[in-house]
Image (cartoon, helix red, strand yellow):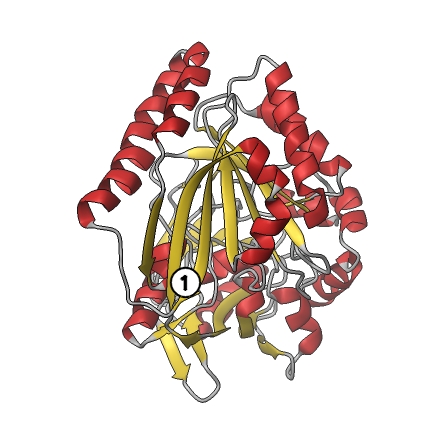
């Protein structure tokens, strides 16, 4: 096989958080679309399932397989920039951080993005990665077209004009429809964002949530369990000039405090859970306000070196504050000790069948625990609150929902499964996770 594929291995695969492992029969790194199509045809002939994998930043087993694991290491880079259409076409295995750097050199940018940029573009979009935004939506919603290699090796080009029924669902496809080989994103001239970070009490931020959301292009906040303290972040476009944080101050805030000291605090909390409330109070009080202005990816994203487990639910935006207050009450009344802040973000409605913001303006509540800490009791209690409010779980984060629940949560669920039945009737791209969330 070495003469057919760029690289073939048989080593085990493990995701970023370390909670999912798989040992595929073979792991293959095709170097072209033609090689990718041949991988799929060969796997089908051998009776093996196929799953593409990115950088493993999903907490679910979306990419796990005991068949053929497709690594996109050799399918990277920008294919084409169309300045008239203001789009960029990029190979599916390109990490977001490389795309952001390349676009910045060209004076371009995505409109919105999540706070981590380690994922590949296909991995991020296939699981619904998002940031926060009043008007601008997830990375998947910024897709103008995509190239999909289906189970029989056919290369489908999908957009609103070409294979529109596939395009309507494949922008967030969970790897269930085929293997994405390239994505075309909308881009715009690079712009400046002014970030204003400010501590705020829980009572104030929840009372003023609608106002803070309405007045800012990008608003998010973090609540520190066992305290009444939050940290807020407001990102808005700026005419400039650029005023990035100083190197020393940025290192202290983003590396020393957010990663180094936080790592030590989490390790101590895991070893001695009784210290967590005191650590949370100290951590939340140590925060100070800061304002800086820079290009988008330097404002939206930040390093995340402390490994954790995460669950996130999308709710109707009008339900977010009530649900968060219920989470706070639950934690206050329980013996749980929670070392990680709870994150709240927003997104406008979009038109993607399985997007967590499909057809409704949404708010996201994300809960985390330090890796190695038992998380089931906390996540189960939070999930009960989220589902009571009609929540939709993030596809790449821990949850226990199944197809029966999700079919009720997504009005266009049947549209997705119908396209899947047509493109992959034999479930070449199936695995246990997809069987649970999509049915069979």
Q: Is residue 112 above or below residue 187?
A: above
Q: Is residue 414 above or below residue 26?
A: below
| Name of the residue lying farthest toward the left | 248
Q: Helix, strand, or loop for circle 1?
A: loop
Tell me residue 244's x, y (percent): 26, 56
Q: Is residue 332 above or below residue 164?
A: above
User: How many numbered marks appear?
Assistant: 1
Label 1 sits on residue: 93
Q: Is residue 95 visible?
A: no
Relative to 68, 351 lies left or right: right
Q: Residues within 10 Å of mark 1 (few under 14, many from 20)?
A: many
Relative to 437, 85 lies left or right: left
Image quarter where the N terminus lies is bottom left
Tell me residue 162's x, y (percent): 64, 82
Residue sitting at x 53%, y 46%: 65
Relative to 96, 407 lies left or right: right
Name the one closer to the observer, 130 or 147: 130
Residue sitting at x 45%, y 24%: 339
Residue 285 position by quadrant: top left
Residue sitting at x 68%, y 77%: 164
Relative to 431, 413 lies left or right: right
| Name of the residue lying farthest toward the bottom | 84
Q: Is residue 203 visible?
A: yes
Tell me residue 434's x, y (percent): 65, 48
Name the one closer to the observer, 174 or 393: 393
Tell me residue 248's x, y (percent): 18, 44
């Amino acid at each position: 096989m070495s003469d057919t594929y760029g690289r073939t291995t048989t080593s085990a695969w493990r995701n970023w958080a370390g909670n999912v492992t798989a040992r595929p029969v073979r792991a293959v790194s095709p170097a072209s679309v033609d090689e990718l199509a041949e991988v799929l045809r060969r796997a089908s002939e051998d009776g093996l399932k196929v799953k593409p994998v990115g950088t493993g930043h999903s907490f679910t087993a979306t990419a796990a397989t005991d068949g053929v694991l497709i690594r996109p290491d050799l399918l990277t880079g920008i294919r084409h920039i169309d300045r008239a259409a203001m789009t960029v076409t990029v190979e599916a295995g390109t990490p977001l951080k490389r795309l952001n750097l390349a676009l910045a050199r060209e004076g371009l940018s995505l409109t919105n993005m999540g706070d981590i940029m380690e994922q590949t573009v296909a991995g991020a979009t296939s699981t619904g990665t998002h940031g926060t935004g009043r008007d601008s939506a997830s990375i998947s919603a910024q897709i103008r077209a995509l190239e999909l290699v289906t189970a029989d090796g056919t290369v489908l080009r999908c957009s609103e004009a070409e294979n529109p029924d596939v395009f309507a669902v494949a922008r967030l496809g969970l790897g269930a429809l085929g293997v994405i080989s390239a994505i075309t994103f909308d881009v715009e001239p690079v712009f400046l964002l002014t970030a204003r970070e400010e501590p705020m009490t829980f009572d104030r931020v929840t009372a003023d949530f609608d106002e803070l959301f309405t007045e800012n292009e990008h608003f998010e906040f973090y609540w520190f369990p066992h305290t009444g303290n939050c940290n807020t972040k407001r990102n808005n476009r700026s005419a400039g000039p650029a005023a990035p944080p100083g190197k020393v101050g940025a290192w202290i805030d983003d590396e020393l405090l957010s990663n180094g000291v936080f790592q030590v605090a989490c390790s101590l909390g895991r070893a001695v859970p009784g210290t967590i409330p005191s650590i949370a109070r100290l951590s939340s009080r140590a925060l100070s306000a800061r304002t800086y202005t820079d290009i988008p990816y330097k404002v939206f994203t930040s390093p995340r070196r402390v490994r954790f487990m995460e669950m996130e639910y999308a709710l109707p935006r009008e339900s977010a504050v009530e649900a968060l207050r219920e989470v706070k009450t639950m934690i206050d009344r329980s013996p749980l000790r929670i070392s990680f802040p709870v994150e709240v973000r927003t997104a406008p409605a979009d038109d993607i069948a399985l997007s967590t913001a499909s057809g409704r303006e949404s708010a996201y509540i994300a809960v985390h625990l330090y890796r190695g800490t038992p998380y089931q009791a906390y996540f189960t209690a939070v999930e009960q609150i989220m589902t009571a409010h009609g929540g939709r779980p993030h596809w790449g984060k821990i949850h226990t929902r199944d197809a029966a629940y999700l079919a009720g949560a997504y009005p266009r669920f049947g549209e997705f499964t119908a396209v899947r039945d047509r493109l992959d009737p034999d479930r070449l791209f199936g695995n246990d996770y997809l069987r649970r969330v999509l049915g069979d």
